[in-house]
Image (tube, grey):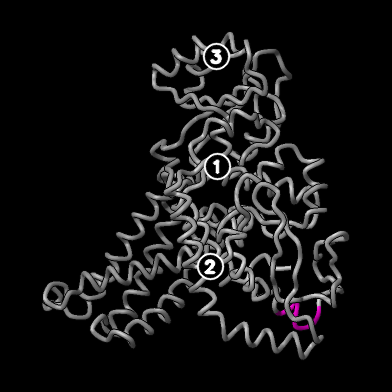
Amino acid sequence: MIRTFTAYVPARTLLLGASEAFLVGLAFVAAIVLRFGGDADLVLGYEHGLIKIGLVIAVFFLCMWHLDLYDGQFLCSRFEILPRLLQVVGIMSILLAFVYYTYPQAQLGRSVLVIGAILVVLLVFSWRQMFFSLLRQFNCVQRAIVFGTGTFAIALGREAKRRPELGIDLLGYVDCHNQSSEVDGLPYFGTSTSLPEIVRGNRVSRVIVALEDRRGKLPIEELLKLKSQGVVVEKGDDFYESITGKVALDSLRPSSLLFVSGYHLSRLQVAVRRVVSFLFASVGLAIASPLMLVAWIGVWLDTGRPVIFRQSRLGKDGKVFTIYKFRTMRNDPNRDDDHKPAQKGDSRVTRVGRWLRRTRIDEIPQLYNILRGDMSFVGPRPFVPSQEAELLRVIPFYNRRLDVKPGATGWAQVNRGYCASLDDNIEKLAYDLFYIKHMSVGFDLLIILRTFKILLLGRGAQ
């Protein structure tokens, strides 16, 4: 796993992306050669053909990212790649047409684009079918065992098994005490006393330590010896976070939050985050002002006043502030002392409100909260005080969300979506704590990019 902007990306995903960039460039170089023959070197050199191809590659990867073709759920899917790849080429053609209309000097030529697009589909589709097979054939897979058989160890094993893009072949489990012959469908190899023999006999290259209580049980000498021999020994918590983007609440200890770099930001980082939030909010309000006017008129004509919905929310350090949104439900259905989250198909939502929620336009007035400093652009989602009090009572570590400013968007929102139940909020807290542990300006920018993607695709609205 390689860390970029505090998010972890499998190394083989980056390798796949780099190889596909080469293939796209190769496809358009071939298209120029097929179209211009002996004059191709003139087009590539004197007419800046390589720079123009670089632009095409950039647009191609923007479209691939937009359609999730580097996300784990589609990365290895043989059935999804072709239709999504055709969509990529279609969207890429539209975007390039707009760019070429604006900057005619960037054009490669219509025939080159057609030939290049056909070659891109053929090359990238064929390469996707071969890539992971070649990695397996050349044994580019890490054979791993999990040290531990508790609830957390099993959850970690399940996450690793359902992510083939990681390149980790999970062989089974070991523990300090004898267990049954099988743990969650995988072999139980034995106790820690025979750990070196287990590693050698199964050619293990990674040991993931997922003991729920390591005090006095961890075979330090054996693990250090294995590490000196090139075996990767990794904390289960770190591994779990790197592959899921959330913390493991069942095994979370206060020290996991205490000894991290991101939990507290320097004054400079706080200032930069404030400036970034202010700039994004200011630009957002300026760009969205026509939409806000349409929304204002729509709500007023549909259900009358008030057009703006005001509600108390809990901010940093438990400070109460008023949040602003366009009203999407019937007049004052959610009082602060009787808050009920919206459900799918909620009858309280108005006709215009349903459209505002689907497009997320109802959230735009929150940019005013960001300008005032009540919220940051990125952070945990704020809830009403009564709801927060209930969640604080039943969910361990929930109060840590109040150590940072809430946000209009956040790591939990882009990964989990809308919260309507206790289980949803527990899952969302796992993402929020991961964000709090790893806060940085770069991480904020990544979340903002993913938020724009979700808005464009219309995902997660209730």
Q: Name the residue under label 2.
A: 452
Q: Name the residue under label 1.
A: 243
Q: Is residue 299 left or right of residue 137?
A: right
92 to the left or right of 199: left
**For residue 321, which quarter of the picture?**
bottom right
Given this view, does label 3 or label 1 mark the residue nearer the observer? 1
Q: 149 or 379, which is in the foreground?
A: 379
Q: In this view, does 203 lie above or below 294?
A: above
Across and down, in percent, residue 306 comes to: 78, 80
**354 is within the stretch colored magenta:** yes
Quarter of the picture containing the C terminus is bottom right
Q: Observer-nearest residue: 280 or 454?
A: 280
- The image shows residue 274 at horizontal and vertical percentages of 49, 58
Relative horizontal placement of residue 338, taking residue 110 as reference (left or right): right
Q: How many residues crowd around disc 1 within 10 Å: few (fewer than 14), some, or many (20 or more)? A: some
Which residue appears at 53% of the width and 67% of the height? Answer: 452
Which span of residues is magenta-colored?
350-355
| Overall secondary structure of the magenta section | helix
Q: What element carries label 3?
A: helix
Q: Who's the residue at 46% across and 61% down the image?
A: 276
Q: Is residue 248 left or right of residue 303?
A: left
Q: Regarding mark 1 in the picture, which secondary structure is present there?
A: helix
Q: Is residue 276 above or below residue 39?
A: above
Q: Residue at x 60, y 48 (%)?
A: 404
**Residue 390 lies in the magenta-colored region:** no
Does the rendering let one see residue 132? no
Q: Position of residue 116 (x, y in %)?
A: 32, 74
Q: Which of marks 2 and 1 is in front?
A: 2
Dot 3 amino acid type = Leu
Residue at numbered disc 3: 195
